[in-house]
Amino acid sequence: MDDSLIARARRRQAYWLVLPTVIVLAAIAGWPLLRTIWFSLTNAQLSDMSAREFVGLANYIGEAGVLRDGEWWHSVSNTLFFAIISVVLESLLGLGVALLLNTPSRIQALLRAAVLVPWAIPTVVSAKMWSWMLNDQFGVVNAALQSMHLISTPLAFTADPHLAFPTIIMVDVWKTTPFMALLILAALQLVPEDCYEAAKVDGVPRWRVFRYITLPLIMPGILVAMIFRTLDALRVFDLIYVMTSNSHVTKSMSVYVREQLIDFQQVGYGSASATLLFLIIALSTTIYMVGTRRRMENAA
């Protein structure tokens, strides 16, 4: 049989194998998305969904649309700031932890299990746990800082507008750095030992080995980990909502959407903000992936 016919048959077989997955994804993700977009074009209210009317793009660009709401743009800037700072910190700390875990040790397995504990705790549980620990009246963190004479009066970490956002980022970094370390560690273990042995024979300093051998080889793994974390950070909800509820200072896009849908019962308006949230995440991911691909092509 001709090679082109074989290739065409294999491609057709691959399409048939992928088809069930595409159908399932369309059912569990595509249909809710299309329904949300449809509701965003109506004035639906949660109290009476049957009375909705088609209003076009009024929920987006109308006089009282989402894009003219300062609170929405404030939540967008909060979310982007949270995503950028937390992902950068988690990547740097995750790289450091991965390098330590990759060092041969008798208790290596125990260290790897221990470092994953924060990531294994559900986000809601860890957020509530840190809320109690950081409480200004009876939290252990304030008690420890006062006993060391670092502060004279208790700090309201989650209520003070100047401390709330850094506190949330700190808790997120504590929880998610192990996830980044795990992915980067997997990339580190794929680096061929021959490269290190050749560098050792040539007497190359450790920093130059890391700069010119280790880092380029694990960079694809780091970038993949950063994509996963960026997607997760852009839709952050539970951590912020549990620690600071509907606070204006820390409100993210997901908290804004929940407020419109549940508190104000504006299904049409809330669906419009949810659709914009989806578009922002899709656009950010596309830009990030295009930039990453160009960087990897230039490096190659």
Image (cartoon, helix red, strand yellow):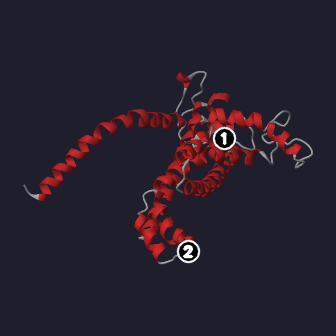
Q: Secondary structure at mark 2?
A: loop
Image location of residue 137, percent across then percent down: 86, 34
- Seen in the image, is 5 located left or right of residue 265? left
Q: Work out whether 76 lies above or below 23.
A: below
Please identify the quadrant where the C terminus is shown. bottom left
Locate the N terminus by quadrant: bottom left
Label 1, on which residue? 64
Mark 1 surroundings within 10 Å by alpha-carbon count, few (fewer than 14), some (14 through 19), many (20 or more): few
Q: Nearer the viewer, residue 196 or 82?
A: 196
The total number of labels drawn is 2
Q: Do the residues under discs 1 and 2 have CB atoms within 8 angstroms?
A: no
Q: Position of residue 71 (x, y in %)?
A: 70, 44
Residue at far bottom of view:
202
Report the residue at 61% width, 42% height from top. 236
Q: Which residue is mark 2?
A: 205
| Other residues around mark 2 within 10 Å, as few (<14) / some (14–19) / many (≥20) | few
**Residue 26: x %, y % from top left:** 38, 37
Label 1 or label 2, whichever lies nearer to me, is 2
Position of 48 relative to 59 (above/below): above
**Residue appearing at x 64%, y 33% in the figure:** 124
Q: Nearer the viewer, residue 232 or 93?
A: 93
The three-letter code of the residue at mark 1 reads: Ala
Please, which residue is most extreme toward the front here? 106
